[in-house]
Image (spheres, helix red, strand yellow):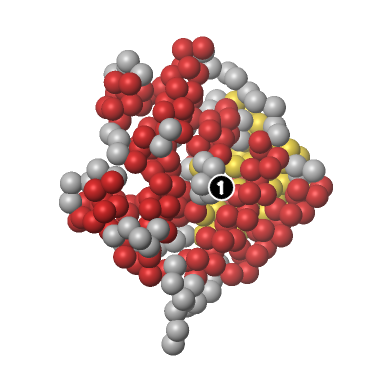
Amino acid sequence: MKIDFQYSTDFLAMNAPELGHTCMHLLCTAGEGSFVFNERCYRIVRNDLVVMPNPTRAKNLAAAPGMEVEWFAADNKFLQSQLPSNNYSIGGSVSLNQNPVIKLTDRQAAYLLDDFHRLRDRMDDRDLLFYRELMGSLCLTMMYDIFEPHAKREPTETHSDRTAYIVKQFLALLDTGISRTEREVRYYAERLNVSPKYLSATVKRVTGHSVSSFIDRATVTILKKKLDDERLSLTQIADQMNFNTLSYFSRYCRKLLGQSPSDYRRSLQPRYK
C-alpha cells in the first residue's frame, strides 16, 4: 500500500478531489473562515481544529482576509492501522460526523502544530528502512493529542432515538471483540433485528462511515495483538479468527495493515545490515 501524506497552509485546498481517501486535520492559526459540512455551516477561528475523513465532503469554503491555517492529511487506511487498542476513535467518529470542529486551548494548539511540523519534516524520508513505523509513530502521537480535547468536548446529539440506539448497539457489539470471528454486515444486522440495508444506511447517515469500516477498525486491534504474540503461528491465528484459508487471511491483513502478516511480523524485529 502506498502511504500518502500531505501538508499545506492553503485552506481552500482542503477539499481537493485527490484528498478523498485521506483524513484531514486542519488547525486555524489566525483569522477566520467557514465551510459547509452535512448541510450545516461551520465558522472556524484561531485554535479551532477540523478533523474530517474524506474532506471532499466539505463545501463552500470561504476564508476572510488574514486567515491562516496549517493542515496535515494522511491516508485513512494507514491511520486506521495505527489506531490505539482503546478504540476511542470508533465512537469518536460518530460525534465528529455531527460536528467536525474541536476547540483547542493555546497549549493544545501548540502541541498539535508541533505534531504537524514533525510529520511535515519527515514525510519525504521514504528511503528509510523504518519509514512506515516512523510515520505511524508520529501519526499516533498526533491522534492522541487530538483525542484528549475531543474526549472532553460536549457531546452533540442530533439524531432520533431510534437511529442513535441502533448505532450505539452496533458499536457496543464491536466493543465485545466479536469481530474476531464475525466480520459480515449481515451478522450485525441480524443481532440488531434490522436489515443489512437499514443498518448500513443508518450507520452511514449518523457517522459518515460504512458498517464495514467500523468492523475493520475493531478487527485491526485484535489482529495486531494476535500477530504480536510470537507463540501463535499464522495458521493458528487464521483459525482463531475464523478465516477459511491462510491465503484469505493474508489478503485481509494486506487490506487492514497494508502488508502481509509475515511482513508485519518482520517489521517488529530489529533489522541489521
In percent of width and height, residue 181 lies at 30, 39
Residue at which label 1 appears: 24
**Residue sticking out furthest to the top:** 161
Q: Is residue 161 above or below residue 86?
A: above
Choose top left, top right, bottom left or bottom right for residue 3: bottom left
Left or right: 117 with respect to 244? Answer: right
- The residue lying at 24 percent from left, 56 percent from top is 235
- The residue lying at 33 percent from left, 26 percent from top is 188
Q: Secondary structure at mark 1?
A: strand
In percent of width and height, residue 115 lies at 67, 58
Left or right: 257 with respect to 234? Answer: right
Is residue 65 visible in the rendered image? The answer is no
**Residue sticking out furthest to the left:** 245
Q: Nearer the viewer, residue 50 or 163?
A: 163
Classify 10 Å Cα crowding around label 1: few (below 14), some (14-19), many (20 and above).
Answer: many
In percent of width and height, residue 237 lies at 29, 52
Q: Quadrant of the C terminus?
A: bottom left
**Residue sticking out furthest to the right:** 106
Q: Nearer the viewer, residue 116 or 82?
A: 82
Q: Is residue 255 above or below residue 147?
A: below
